[in-house]
Amino acid sequence: MEGRDIVVGVDGTADCDAALMWAAGEAGRAGTRLVVVHAWQPRAVGFAPYARPRRGTGKEEPAREVLERAVLRARAAAPGVKVAGRIVRGRPEAVLRHEASGAALLVLGSAAHRAGDGRLGAVLLACLRWPPCPLVVVGAGHPVEPGACLPVAAAAC
């Protein structure tokens, strides 16, 4: 894995925070760079491209804040790891697959427990269906400390 980035997708939820912490620890163990990716798009775009976004929904600032918090948290958790942040406008599943193309790993959180019936979200399913690189899914609802062992699922491309 050395020399290739570990990419982690974040959206500000606890599930993605668990994935972020796991990815930071793994990047430290592997001696590789961690790339934190947050995809965003104006809310109205996916549903009605002609509609005006509501006040504040078409702005990049909230997305940038999510990314900056995640990058700071990763740097604090793994001080020896080089951490880069990328904010990309677009659909999360497409952005993550593109950004992780050729990476050592793509790490995502699982929000299955929030659905209440174990269903996986559309972003995770798309990345599992067409993985751009080996994919790790960090189990939902687990408190994470750097270096902690967590239940994960992996898929190879």
Image (spheres, rainbow, N blue to C red):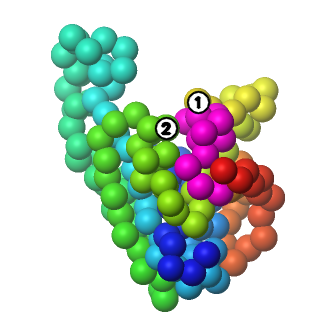
Q: Is residue 8 above or below residue 88?
A: below
Does the residue at mark 1 contact the one at mark 2 (Cβ under 8 Å)? yes
Q: Which residue occupies 37% across, 70% down?
A: 84
- Give amino acid for label 1: Ala
- Give amino acid for label 2: Glu
Q: Which residue is mark 2?
A: 93
Q: Which residue occupies 61% across, 46% down?
A: 131
Q: Nearer the viewer, residue 82 or 43?
A: 82
Q: Does the magenta run of residues contain 148?
A: no
The boundaries of the magenta stretch are: 123-134
Q: Nearer the viewer, residue 14 or 153?
A: 153
Q: Which residue occupies 50% across, 60% down?
A: 102
Residue 98, image x and y in percent? 43, 47
Q: Nearer the viewer, residue 97 or 44?
A: 97
First of labels 1, 2 by sequence position = 2
Quadrant including the N terminus = bottom right
Residue 23, image x and y in percent? 59, 67
- Please give the label number shown on residue 122: 1
Does 155 sit left or right of 131 as displayed?
Answer: right
Q: Is residue 129 above or below residue 51?
A: below
Q: Residue furthest bottom?
A: 80
Tag 2 secondary structure: helix
Tag 1 secondary structure: helix
Q: Is residue 51 above or below residue 140?
A: above
Q: CA distance from mark 1 to mark 2?
A: 8 Å
